[in-house]
Image (spheres, coloured by chain):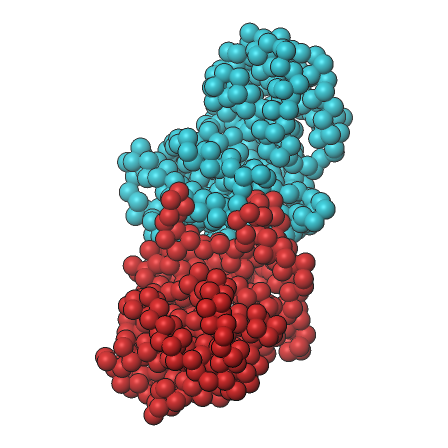
Chain colours: A red, B cyan
Amino acid sequence: MYGIGIMSGTSLDGIDTVLVKITGYSTETQLEVIAYNEYPLHKELVSKIKKACSLEHSHSDLICSLNFELGYSFCDAVKALLQKANFPLEKIDYIASHGQTIFHIPENKESLYRSTLQIGEAAILAYQFQTTVISNFRVMDMAAGGQGAPLVPYSEYILYSQSHKNRILQNIGGIGNLTFLNGSLNIDDIFAFDTGPGNMMINEACQILYNLPFDDHGQIAKQGKVISVLLDELMNHPYMQKLPPKSTGREDFGEFFVKDILSRYSQHEKADIITTFTMFTAKSIAFHYQRDILTKYPLDDVIIGGGGSHNDTLMQFIKDELYPIPVYTQDEIGYSSDAKEAIAFAILGNETLNHHYSNVKSSTGANRYVILGQITPKPF
Amino acid sequence: MYGIGIMSGTSLDGIDTVLVKITGYSTETQLEVIAYNEYPLHKELVSKIKKACSLEHSHSDLICSLNFELGYSFCDAVKALLQKANFPLEKIDYIASHGQTIFHIPENKESLYRSTLQIGEAAILAYQFQTTVISNFRVMDMAAGGQGAPLVPYSEYILYSQSHKNRILQNIGGIGNLTFLNGSLNIDDIFAFDTGPGNMMINEACQILYNLPFDDHGQIAKQGKVISVLLDELMNHPYMQKLPPKSTGREDFGEFFVKDILSRYSQHEKADIITTFTMFTAKSIAFHYQRDILTKYPLDDVIIGGGGSHNDTLMQFIKDELYPIPVYTQDEIGYSSDAKEAIAFAILGNETLNHHYSNVKSSTGANRYVILGQITPKPF
C-alpha cells in the first residue's frame, strides 16, 4: 500500500507530510519512505490556530471554521508532497492525519472532563483525494483510560525494535522524552516518559539574552562554562525527584522559570547561562537513564532525534555523560528525524486499516490495547 | 443487523435513541423499530451545551471537554434504551450517532469557512459498547459542496416514498424542515430545506417568560392573540426571502434573537408573544409550501413529525393555513414521530457500513452523492 502521513505539531512551524510504501502490519511491517515535505503554515493560519488554542480568544465559530480550513490546508500540503515526489494521486491507498491539537486535558479537573481535541477535517481530505482517511488517533486511547499521548512509541517499536537489543530513542524537542525499546520485543516492556527540558530553556534564554530563536549548532554553549551552583539547583528541581511515568511542559520549564533564573544569575556571563542550560538538558537525560533504566536493564545504544540532535554541543555533552554507551542521531541511522511524527501516523493509520491496535499501554496509561482513529471512507 | 440510532437535537429536550432491526440497504431496506427512548439531558449539561454554542461563552477547553462528556451521556442514553428494550448489548452491530451541533456555517462569510461542528465523542461509545460507531454525518456532504443539511430526506425516501403520491414530510424540532417526496420515486426529484424556526423560539420564550421548557400541547399559545406587527416583522426575516436549498439554526432564531424581541415587545401580554411565535412557525411553513412547492407540484398530503406535532395549537394553525390539503401527524400514520431522526441516523449508518451514499443532492446542494460519516472501528 501507499500511504500518506500528516502531522501538524504544537510548535506550529509547518505541516509535515510523508509518502510511504508500506506492507504488512504490526511487527511484520515493511516501510519505505518515498518522500518527505514540510509545508509552511502561513502567518494568518498560525494566528488563527493560536487563537483557537487560547482560552480567552477561542470561540465555537472559529473552531468550527478552522476545522474545515485546516482540512483544506492539509490538502495543499498533500498536493505539494505529491508534486515533490512526482507521484500519482490515484496510487494513494490512504491518508493518516494527526490533526492540529487545539486542547488537551490529561486529567479531570473541576468541571472539565479528561479529553483531547484535534481538528483538520478528514472529510475534506477524503473528498479531495477520493481516498480513505484515518484521523483522530488520540481519542480512543483516552476512552480506554489513557492520556492519549505519547503515540509515537508504537511506531518506534515497529521501526527500531531489535531482538536482544535494549535501545533508547531520545527525542529532544521543547521537552525531552524517551522511549525504551526492550530487546525482548514484547510491547508490554516498552515505556516512555519525559526526561525534563529539551531545547525549551536554551531557546528561551537565547531569545532573551541574544535575541536569537535558538543556539545554532550549540555554538554559544560551546564558548561558555558551566555555573555549578546553578546546575546543582536545576538538578534539584522537583521534576527530577518524581518517578516515571511522568510528563512535563512549558508550565515547569518555560518562560516564567527561565526569567526567574536569569534575574537571579544576572551577574554571570551570558554564554555561561546557555552552557549550563545545555548541560542541564544532557545531565537530566543521563540522570533518568541511570536511575530508571540502567538499574534494571543494560543499554545497547541511544538514538537521538528532534531539533536538539542538531545542537552539537548538547550532543557532545550527552555522549560524555553516557560514555561508553554509543549515541547516534536519528539521521545517522536511517529515518529522517524531521519526518518522524508524520511517519508515525502513516504507521498508525496502516494498523487501523488492518484492524490492529496501536497504542502502547505502558506509555499512555490505557487499560487496553485499542484500535486507534476514525475512518472516513473513500466517499464515492 | 441490529443498530442503534442516537439523535441529540438543537431543541435540547433530550437524547433520542432507537433500536432497530435492519436488513438490506438503499431501496431494499427493511426496517423494524424495536424500541425507542428519550433520555433526559440534565440541566447542567443543557447549560454547558448552550455555552458551547454561544459566541461569547464558548472556549476551546469547554468544547474539548464537552465532546467527551456528551460521549458519556450518549452511553447512558444507550444503556437506558437497552434496558427498556431488555435487549442484550452483545447483539448490537453498530451505533449511528448524529452528535450535538455546536455550530453550523452554511456559507463562507468574512473570515469563516463553510463548515459544521457536531460533538459527542464516538470513541467513548465504541469503547463502552465494544461496537462500531458511525458519526459526523454532515461533514462529507459539506466537503462535497453541500450544506450538510438536511440529511433526514434520505431516510424519508427509504421509509415514506409512495408511487404516484406527492407528499411532504414536515419535521418540527428546534428548526422546522420539510422533505418533498415526489411520486416518481426518483431520488433526484426529492428536495428538502429548513422552513425556519420550529419550536426554538417558542421554547426559548417559554423558558424566559414562564420558566417552562416548552408550551405543553400549545396550551399557552391557545390563550393568547397574535401581535400582528410582530408577526409581520418575523415574516420579513431575511431567511424567508432566501430561496431553497437553505438551512438555518440557533444562530438565526436562538436565544439572542428571541431576547431582542422580548425586550422590544415587553409591553405585550406574555401569552400573546407565545401565540405569535407559534403562528410564525405555522405561517413560515405554509409560506414556503405556497412559494416553493405548490407553484410546481400538486400535493397529496402532509405528514408532521417532531416535538411540534404534539403542540395542538400549532397543529391547528398549520391545518388552517394549508386547508384543504390533508395534514397528519407522523404517529397517525406509522413510525413514531419522536423517534424519527434517531431512526434516520440508524438508516444512514447502515448505508455507510454498506458503502452506499446517503445524502440527497437536491436537498443539501451537494455536487455528488457521497458516503456519509466517519467510522470508529470496534476497538478490540
Regarding residue B343, the answer to whether it shows in the image is no
The residue at 23%/79% (across/down) is: A296
- Residue A327: which quarter of the image? bottom left
Q: Nearer the viewer, residue B103 or A82?
A: B103
* Residue A76 in the image: above or below residue B255: below
Query: Relative to residue B366, is residue A301 drawn left or right?
Result: left
Q: Quadrant of the C terminus of chain A?
A: bottom right
Task: Please say whether residue B127 is visible from this viewpoint.
Answer: yes
Q: Position of residue B84 (x, y in %)?
A: 31, 33
Residue A169: percent from left, percent from top: 40, 79
Q: Nearer the viewer, residue B150 or B185?
A: B150
Q: Is residue A312 above or below residue B66?
A: below
Residue A172 to residue B68: above or below: below
Looking at this view, name the residue that lies furthest to the left. Answer: A296
Q: Would residue B124 appear left or right of A376 to someone viewing this image?
A: left
- In this orientation, which residue lies closer to the viewer: B1 or B204? B204
The answer to whether residue B367 is left or right of residue B270 is: right
Extreme residue in the bottom direction: A324
Choose between A275 and A78: the one closer to the eye. Answer: A275
Q: Position of residue A330 (x, y in %)?
A: 47, 83
Where is residue A144? Give x, y as percent: 34, 56
Q: Residue at x 41, y 30 (%)?
A: B43
**Tag count in the figure?**
0
Q: Considering only vertical position in the picture, is A109 above or below A240?
A: above
Point 48% across, 48% down: residue: B61
Residue positioned 32% across, 88% down in the render: A300
Residue positioned most to the front: A267
